[in-house]
Image (cartoon, grey):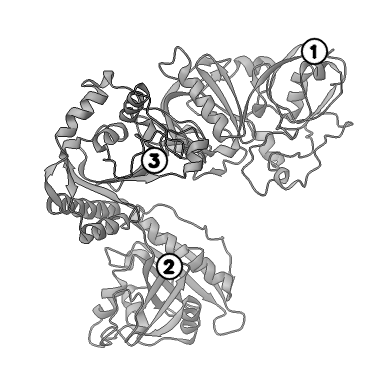
Amino acid sequence: MLCLAHQNYFGIDENLGPVAISIARDKLDVIQARLSNLSSPYVYRIIIRLSDLSTFRGSIIEESLPSYQLTKEQAQTVSQPMSPTGFASGLVSSSSTKIPVKEILELVIPELTSSCLKLAVPLPRTEEMLLKLDEQAIYTRYKVGVLLCKANQCTEEHMYNNEFSTPAFEEFLDILGDRIRLKGFDKYKGGLDNKGDSTGTHSVYTTYQQYEIMFHVSTMLPFTPSNRQQLARKRHIGNDIVTIIFQEPGAMPFNAQTMRSHFQHVFIIVRAVDAGTDNVQYSIAVTRFKDVPVFGPPVPANYLFPRSQEFREFLLTKKTVINAENAVHKSAKFAQMAARTRREFMRELAENHCISHSIESSSVKITSKILGNKRKDRPKPKVFLEAFNHGAVVWDVQVLTELENFSLCSTIDCYLGISVDYLVMIERSSNITLFCTATHSVIGWTSQGNSLKLYYDHADVIILRTVDDDDGLILNDIITRLKMVTKGYETQEMILRHNPSDVLDFRIQYEGIVNDVDMYGPSWLAGLRQGSRIVEISKVSVASLTYPKMLEFLKNANTRVLVIPPLEDGSPRRGCEDPHCPAVRGEVTPIIPTDWVPHSGTFPPHLPGRSPPSYETVMHRQRSGTIAESLTGSKCKRELKVQTETGERVSGYSSKSLDELRS
């Protein structure tokens, strides 16, 4: 936002604590705004910084504000002429239009008492402090300790008192980075002295992409023969969050409890095998404090890395070291320290970098006139559901945790947010993200009353219903948004009529994708086409059926199915997010052999749309058995219907049971 003319507001809210807000009025592309039928090409961009390490960034289309709607109505009353760009000239007079701060904050963060905010002093120093605040959680420079552990050594005292290096250790340091002369070194020095050689003459330094890493190597730091604690070395290594322990052959097992430091939270133990030979290899183990969250990449069990670029990348560029430090910053101890620092920093801004008076009291009367004195009297902002609105449009919904024929068993109150890129559900009471998937994985939906079945990925389903929506307007808005940002389509109900003893007049794949339909047959006349995707058979989700059971259901007379029609080019709608999926690569024959007959214990060949499951996985997966069991046999379990084959990660969250998500 530094490149935009903007206003900063600081304050201390009674409930939220110190707050820092930045607002700018930005102009959209005029052609895009006209194509989107916008009366105003302006948008307000906002950053809200709270003292609990939370920062929210977003934008509000100017035309969505109630005050703009009121001004627009007044302009239409007096027949306001249009500007050459196609907008009402009085509504888009200039970019100097005053920002309606109170109105925007009322819509975006109603919990905030706007009267506590004061306009920031427009000085470069203020902008520098804000930039520093925004970069607080961005780490691009790391300092890492490196200790040498020789044969028969294991304690902290042994490692700190190794005065000289060894050939095996030097060879390992060559893998880590480059040796640099500290005196005159003008890059990241990690607290080392680059003027007087008081911390040694040389060190090891490396870069990768935007990251800089300075290694505090024990044998390169000053050695004091009369001091067994080697405080000159421990002053640096003991204050590093991540420490690499290099063990030569014969070193004793490492025990982190021997390290007496309040800052060392992760130890990466690298052990040399066949050191000093051309066949040298390295094993890696990681130990961490219990409050440090798990980080990756996972270390392969019993694996020896050769001396290679791949080993260096795994140790550094694959971010074993970098991820370790980032994980430590998320631990309770460091998070509290960061929150305390942030809170005091923001308090300094609110107390010493503002003008003396708060947001103009005159705007209170204007805002009250527009919004109304009572919250229930205030008009709602205009919502834009089109794809040009990249941010999430949010609704209050209830997620059904178990469903049989749309009969409710249990619900979770959630926020449903749909942006151009993602669909997310957040539990209202805890603000925990229950589900998140990319919008391109949504393949269709079924609406019934104020309930919505949402099909995604491999025709897995989530069921939700809107709140206080007797007229169905909220559900219509959700469906409109889905149409704008996904490739999904409303399901169509069909009745497939045929004799149960006859062979099906269409060919269907494992996931319900129709590969071929006999022209003018009963299914074709019912509307079934090649590329259609059957997602429900006799009110049972296809995602919960084995292939033989799906065929058994379809062979019943007068079978009711829900079908997602194909794309305009006739291809089926797929939501698979795995780029290695055989269906995405087109490497799997899409036709089920016509001579394949289901027998007990046999399975169809793998078909497009789903990564091949192991037979053991299929055998032990909970799927519907008989029709009676499918319709009446399930019990109320507090879990979301977000099944996937392997619980794969989706946009940073796993499509697993609710209990797994909460844990």
Q: In terms of depth relative to the viewer, which is nearer, 644 or 95?
A: 95
- The first of marks 1 and 2 along the sequence is 2
In the rendered structure, which amino acid carries the disc numbered 2? Tyr
Task: Decide if residue 423 is on the left or right side of residue 444.
Answer: left
Q: Quadrant of the C terminus?
A: top left
The Cα–Cα distance between marks 1 and 3, rounded to whole angstroms, is 56 Å
The residue lying furthest to the right in this view is: 595
Distance of label 1 from label 2 (alpha carbons)? 64 Å
- Tell me: 185 left or right of 635: left
Cα–Cα gap, marks 3 and 2: 37 Å
Instruction: Sort mark 2 into few (<14), some (14-19) or many (20+) by Cα contacts within 10 Å.
Output: few
The residue beneath circle 3 is 42
Name which of mark 1 and mark 3 comes first in the sequence.
3
Name the secondary structure under disc 3: strand
The residue that label 1 is drawn on is 497
* Residue 94 in the image, given as x and y percentages of width and height: 33, 43
CB-based contact (under 8 Å), mark 1 and mark 3? no
* As drawn, 186 above or below 293: below
- Residue at x 38%, y 88% (from the top left corner): 164
Residue bearing the label numbered 2: 211
| Pair 1/3: label in front | 3
Q: Residue at x 64, y 17 (%)?
A: 539
Q: Residue at x 49, y 21 (%)?
A: 475
Question: How many residues crowd around disc 3 within 10 Å: few (fewer than 14), some, or many (20 or more)?
Answer: many
